[in-house]
Image (cartoon, helix red, strand yellow):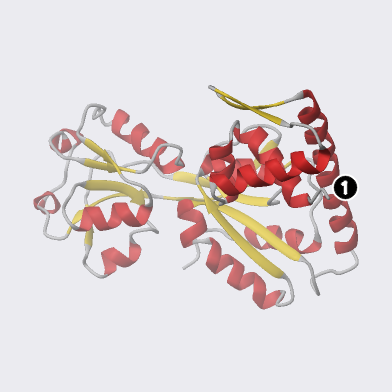
Amino acid sequence: MVSLNQLEVLVAVVEAGGFSGAARSLYMSQPSVSNHVRNLEGSLGVPLVERTTHGARTTPAGDVVVEHARQIFDLLGSLEHAVARFQGLEAGRLVVAGTTTIGTYLLPRLVAEFTERAPKVECQIRVGNEAVVEQWLMRGEVALGLCIDQPQEPLEAEPLFREEMVLVGAAGSALASRALSPGDLAGQRFLLREKGSATRRLQEDILRSWGLESADRWELWGPETLKEAAAEGLGIALLSEHIVRREREAGLLIALQVDPPPPGRSISLVRRADHALTPPEEAFVAQLRAVRSWPY
């Protein structure tokens, strides 16, 4: 018996170009992904995926199955949207994704405000880097995303509001005693987010604009790791003003004043242009458009 879960895993393997990539995108173990594909092949009686030195590729039979799987997912999505029209905000589901900073520090508050108006709507928040969020949107796993960078087609972005970037260091840092120029930072170690992060790209752009491309840098995964490392004196970090607000108020991190200051960035609502919104999604979009600044 073919299951939707097996089809979803097969499509993920194709889109990720391999089993390990599919495992990461689905938050599954690689053996579990392999078992799903193997069971699907057993149900259909034909091989669907070939492992190669460059990853995984579908067989001719696999191409047919993937094409039909996508048609099935489109039909199911259409069914859910059609039924949701009769439910309004008395039922239904809202799935929204955000890049790491936004998903961790902004979406919980926005969803909490939404549930006050729609307590019967089931809500799910997904958090990933920019590339992962775009994959979820492209596959139709989420309808709405909050991101930083301009997305790829057929995704469209609607700018909502801006946030500032802050250069922070450990409390008691000698750098805090004076106004700084980029040249004053040449001997410092910069703590950067992992590759694939929108914040990482902005961090590199800022260092380049300051003429500090060759500055010492360490790559750390996740904003929490960067904050802890900066607080322990392992280096200085360029982070969203909202990520470090509590640590600055508690005196664990200090903001360093640099001229020219790091530029801010725009936060956008990202969605597929061809996606018809359900009533919960429409209500959440209306809420987002009413936000003029990052809510505390």
258 lies above or below 278: above
Circle 1 packing at 10 Å, graded few (<14), some (14-19), many (20+), is few
Q: How many marks?
A: 1
**Image check: 79 left or right of 253?**
right
Closer-to-camera residue (271/184)? 271
Residue in the picture at 44% in, 41% down: 197
Give the left or right position of residue 218, taking residue 199 as reference: left
Residue at the spot 79% in from the left edge and 32% down from the top edge: 46
Q: Residue at x 41, y 37 (%)?
A: 195
Q: Secondary structure at mark 1?
A: helix
- Residue pointed to by mark 1: 75
Residue 14 visible, this orientation = yes
Residue 151, image quadrant: top right
Please give the name of the residue rendered at 12% of the width and 49% of the height, measured from the top-left corner: 175
Quick one: 6 or 136, which is closer to the camera? 6
Left or right: where does residue 75 sit relative to residue 133? right
Q: Quadrant of residue 15?
A: top right
Q: Amino acid at mark 1?
A: Leu
User: What percent of the width, then of the height, locates residue 26?
Assistant: 60, 49
Judge left or right: residue 51 versus residue 99: right
> Residue 158, how many percent across, how many down?
64, 45
- Is there any visible trace of residue 268 in the rendered image? no
Q: Position of residue 277 (x, y in %)?
A: 79, 54
The relative height of residue 123 versus residue 199 in the rendered view (above or below) is below
